[in-house]
């Protein structure tokens, strides 16, 4: 009986892209006789709880990182919209100075949401954009700062060093900043997202993850391995392209 049930569970978890090693690990944690409640309780243990003591600094600075195509810029717009819904003032930093299109896209979102965007010419030092954005927020007493960064592969050493520099400059502009370093992952990439999460976490000590494009994939099972192996909370999931399509992640519902 247990063997048949274990085989059924194994197939279900693998089809959801939980991954072979993670699937075996989950099954090993289950008791001999499995109930739905026991399975749910076991699955929930793999998710890191949301932090309770979030910084109350004003401005509250979030640095958004990830590879090209993960949906960073759209996610930034969604985060900004969430802040506006909470009656907070917001400023954006266009730190992706490698691509003119990225700056233009963020400027368009700024116009649409009626929030300021700090930008510089293409090829400029992105650290200076981060510094100027935080200083502007301090001067204007803006509540939330959200800084974009260039999309980079986790294997690109020069860009990794630049990302570390941005973090250092943020701290110089405001002690304790950035208060959250968030990795945006494409939910359609499945297991390959785990390597990204591990590499970025090793680079700059991430605070959490946002998973995008979950409305178009059955590969959400990779979230188990990402959360378990990196010991990082998942803050939000993206379920569409509109500015309201970012919802808080609740492990019980997932």
Image: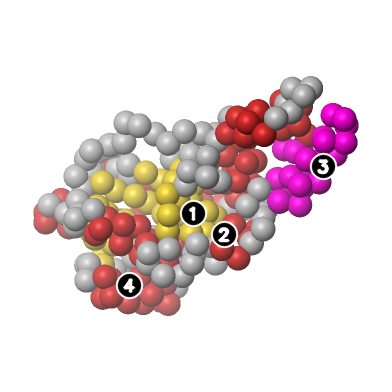
Vertical arrangement, residue 178 with respect to residue 243, above or below: above
Left or right? Give the position of 216 relative to 87. right
Which of the two residues, 124 or 202, is positioned nearer the viewer here? 202
Q: Earlier in the sequence, mark 4 or mark 3?
A: 3
* Residue 168: % across, % down: 35, 44
Task: Kindly state the secondary structure of the residue where label 4 is placed.
Answer: helix
Label 4: few (<14), some or many (≥20) within 10 Å?
Answer: many
Query: Where is the N terminus found, in terms of image quarters?
Result: top right
- Magenta portion: prevailing SS class: helix
Q: Which residue corresponds to the image point at 46% horizontal and 70% vertical from the top-left?
A: 241
**Residues at marks 2 and 1 touching, judged by CB atoms closer than 8 Å:** yes
Task: Kindly state the secondary structure of the residue where label 3 is placed.
Answer: helix
The magenta segment = 1-23
Real-space CA distance between mark 1 and mark 4, rounded to the nearest whole angstrom: 19 Å
Task: Kindly state the secondary structure of the residue where label 1 is placed.
Answer: strand
User: Which residue carries the number 3 mark?
Assistant: 8
User: Which residue carries the number 2 mark?
Assistant: 214
Real-space CA distance between mark 4 and mark 3, rounded to the nearest whole angstrom: 46 Å
| Residue 104 showing in the rendered view | yes
* Residue 226: % across, % down: 60, 42
Q: Earlier in the sequence, mark 2 or mark 1?
A: 2
User: Which residue carries the number 1 mark?
Assistant: 237
* Residue 15: % across, % down: 76, 52
Label 3: few (<14), some or many (≥20) within 10 Å?
Answer: few
Nearest to the eye among marks 3 and 2: give it.
3
Task: Kindly state the secondary structure of the residue where label 2 is placed.
Answer: helix
User: Which residue carries the number 4 mark?
Assistant: 109
Q: Which residue corresponds to the image point at 42% horizontal and 58% vertical from the top-left?
A: 246
């Amino acid at each position: 009986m247990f063997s048949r049930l274990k085989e059924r569970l194994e197939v279900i978890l693998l089809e959801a892209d939980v991954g072979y090693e993670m699937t075996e690990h989950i099954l090993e944690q289950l008791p001999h006789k499995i109930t739905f409640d026991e399975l749910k309780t076991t699955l929930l243990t793999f998710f890191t709880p949301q932090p309770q003591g979030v910084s109350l600094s004003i401005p509250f600075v979030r640095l958004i990182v990830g590879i090209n195509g993960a949906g960073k810029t759209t996610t930034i717009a969604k985060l900004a919209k969430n802040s506006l819904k909470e009656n907070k003032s917001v400023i954006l930093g266009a730190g992706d100075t490698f691509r003119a299109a990225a700056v233009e896209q963020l400027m368009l979102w700024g116009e649409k949401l009626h929030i300021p965007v700090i930008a510089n010419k293409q090829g400029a030092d992105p650290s200076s954009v981060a510094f100027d954005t935080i200083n502007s927020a301090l001067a204007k007493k803006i509540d939330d700062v959200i800084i974009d960064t260039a999309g980079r592969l986790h294997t690109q050493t020069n860009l990794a060093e630049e990302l570390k520099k941005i973090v250092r400059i943020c701290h110089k502009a405001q002690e304790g900043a950035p208060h959250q370093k968030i990795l945006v992952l494409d939910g359609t990439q499945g297991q390959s997202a785990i390597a990204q999460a591990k590499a970025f976490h090793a680079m700059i000590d991430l605070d959490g993850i946002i998973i995008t494009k979950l409305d178009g994939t059955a590969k959400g099972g990779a979230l188990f391995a990402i959360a378990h192996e990196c010991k990082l909370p998942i803050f939000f999931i993206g379920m569409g392209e509109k500015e309201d399509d970012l919802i808080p992640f609740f492990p019980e519902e997932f």
